[in-house]
Amino acid sequence: MTTSLRTPPNHTVLQVGPLKPSLERTLSENYGALVLPDEASERGAFLSTHGPEVTAVVTSGRSGVDADLMRALPHLGAVVNFGVGYDTTDVDAAAERGVGVSNTPDVLTDCVADTAVGLMIDVMRQFSAADRYVRAGRWPADGNYPLTHQVSNRRVGIIGLGRIGSAIAKRLTAFGCTISYHNRSQKADSPYAYVDSPAALARGVDVLVVAAAGGDGTRRLVDAEVIDALGSSGYLINIARGSVVDEAALVDALTNGRLAGAGLDVFTDEPNVPEELLALDNVVLLPHVGSGTVETRAAMEQLTLDNLDEFLRNGRLLTPVVEPAMAV
Ligand code: NAP
């Protein structure tokens, strides 16, 4: 139990995994939050002592709360997730236990969509590679940089036309691109053409952008068949989750010239990036920075704290993925 100002006496907040430093500080100073030890060997003793008092967890898509951890927190009422992707939290187990889960939708949509478009321009025009060419002194030595490929007026397929996918479509429409998409179901109000499978979508476009939610339902949705359907003149952009793409198949296609290029913000085993990709100039590699601006991260931090306050005061969440059901 804590006596901190913002945490009522019947609540205890637990931080799970590393968070934005200012958020960690606020949780510690204003909410008296406990911190789950990183070391697995220390967790058992910590959870035996503190597990029963914890009523709210604050975490991120990097760590999340699995079913085992949920079982060790018998009075948990809410998992407050910093980030829109919550695939590391077991939402089925949460729903079964009446544990609410919230995320931070909308506030990061623009920056992640900007990142997708930036990756698309970079990989097709090879700006990062051309920058390396200049810095290496190759312009005077080797002459003009080789020609690259046009971005405007291309056919773009989006897997996951949700908030971020729609913002990407809006931006690329202004570039004269033709947009088509694949979701599990067609969006009634969408102006874009719906295609009923990822492979069929890939077959008809120049660029495939992955913007679907992560998790078991989308694991390796973009597999070897989809990558081959995109073909040797096609580009893949992934700003969703590494798990959505079969990374081994992607590396194989890129190293063997069966895909023109890829722009990747996310990977299967972050922060590890397949060694084979590092030497390729037709690949742009970003360290999961899609939402990483001062403005967007501040808005995510605020929404995280607003969700936490709403739960601690009223037992509800402002942006729930799963509604809390447990009276704490
Ligand atoms: P959203 O609005 O919930 O959109 C998710 C989309 O994925 C929906 O259109 C959904 O459509 C589709 N989808 C889900 N399962 C699918 C399946 N099995 N097959 C095809 N489509 C499927 O979420 P958002 O706010 O746009 O965020 C999307 C994802 O971006 C997040 O989940 C997160 O993982 C990722 N993200 C990455 C970064 C980064 O830094 N790179 C930052 C923020 C978010 P249906 O339900 O109709 O299938």
Image: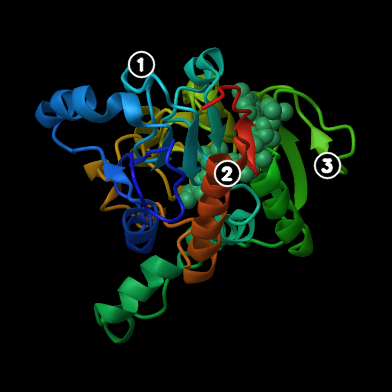
Helix, strand or loop status at disc 2: helix
Work out whether residue 202 can be spotted.
no
The residue identified by callout 2 is 313
Disc 1 and disc 2: Cα gap in Å? 24 Å
Q: Is residue 264 rendered to the left or right of residue 112?
A: left
The residue identified by callout 1 is 71
Q: Which of these two is toward me, 72 or 144?
A: 72
Q: Amino acid at mark 2?
A: Arg
Q: Which of these two is toward me, 115 or 97?
A: 97
Work out whether residue 75 can be spotted.
yes
User: Disc count in the image?
Assistant: 3
Q: Residue 24: x, y in percent?
A: 33, 55
Helix, strand or loop status at disc 3: loop
Q: Is residue 141 rendered to the left or right of residue 227?
A: left
Can you name the residue that lies furthest to the bottom here?
Answer: 140
Do callouts 1 and 3 mark residues in contact (Cβ within 8 Å)? no
Q: Residue 258: x, y in percent?
A: 45, 36
Q: Is mark 1 within 8 Å of ligand 1?
A: no
Q: Which of these two is toward me, 297 or 216?
A: 297
Q: Residue at x 41, y 30 (%)?
A: 88
Mark closer to the chain start, 1 or 3: 1
The image quarter containing residue 256 is top left
The residue identified by callout 3 is 192
Q: Is mark 2 within 8 Å of ligand 1?
A: no
